[in-house]
Image (tube, rainbow, N blue to C red):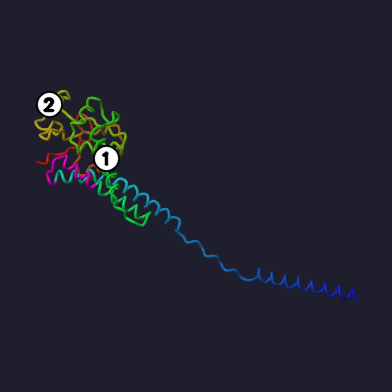
Amino acid sequence: MSTVGSDRSSLKQLRELDAQFDAQLAEYSSPKKNPKPAKKGKKPFLLYRWIAKLLVAIGLLLLPFFLLIRVSLFTYSSYGLNGWLALGSGVLATITLLVFYGSYLSFRFSGKARMRKFLFQSTAVMVLSYCCYALLYLSSMNVKNEQERAHYRSLHPILRVTVATATLADSDLVITDMHRTPEEYLKMGLTPRQQSLHYHQPTGYVHAVDLRTRGRAEWKNWLTAHLLNMLGYQTLRHVGTADHLHVPLPLND
């Protein structure tokens, strides 16, 4: 009897193993659903999206500098404002833009656009500090010699802020001439001019600056000239005694 019982048990186990084998065989032999193919062009699209975000971020960082000079030049030339008042209008426009930046970031991270007094004060101090730096300081690396550097504060205030901003963007930029006299034209073998924006004007300031172009990559010269033109200047490329870029600020009276 024990032998018959063990045979039945073995037969039952064999049937169970056979059923499991049939189930596994059916699973492997059934057709599998093809996985969804990865969308083509997704990675390039993400790359272009990040590049676009980077360009927008750079543009937003440069916009305050552009607005400072562009508004100053516009109010100076279009409304005949005094140089300091025109520069003040550019400062006010830049502070307004930075306050908007701060309010947007506050709303983005806290859900509330907080127009706090501290925000206006901090941006005002930041913009005014930059203008004081631009008006008072010029690195010796960005000027032909110390004699020319000594004339920096005789330059019109809007031109000084423009020059300082340009040297921040391009540390290799070199100013060759600011203030000139008729005697200096004679030394260069040129006929002294009756009128020149390099002379002291009725405003008390020099209204022109020359930038070195010789020894610089031509694409840099082209980019500098076009950026200054976008700001509102009318630059001229002079190839007389020395190749240079002439940046004038005409009188507005």
10 Å neighbourhood of mark 1: few (<14), some, or many (≥20)? Answer: many
Identified at 24% across, 38% down, the residue is: 131
Q: State whether the magenta stretch is mostly helix, strand or loop.
A: helix
Where on the picture, by quarter, is residue 89?
top left
Q: Which residue is mark 2?
A: 182
Residue 192, image x, y percentages: 11, 27
Q: Amino acid at mark 1?
A: Thr
| Left or right of 58 on screen, residue 95 | left
Mark 1 or mark 2, earlier in chain: 2
C-alpha distance separating marks 1 and 2: 28 Å
Asked whether 173 falls inside the magenta stretch, the response is no
Helix, strand or loop at mark 1: helix
Q: Amino acid at mark 2?
A: Pro
Where on the picture, by quarter, is residue 18?
bottom right
In the displayed structure, 41 sits above or below 132; it is below
| Left or right of 198 on screen, residue 108 | right
Asked whether 83 falls inside the magenta stretch, the response is yes
10 Å neighbourhood of mark 2: few (<14), some, or many (≥20)? Answer: some
Q: Quadrant location of the C terminus?
A: top left
Q: Which residue is mark 1?
A: 224
Residue 242, image x, y percentages: 22, 30
Where on the picture, by quarter, is residue 10?
bottom right
- Is 189 or 101 nearer to us in this picture? 101
Instruction: Read off the magenta span.
Output: 78-93
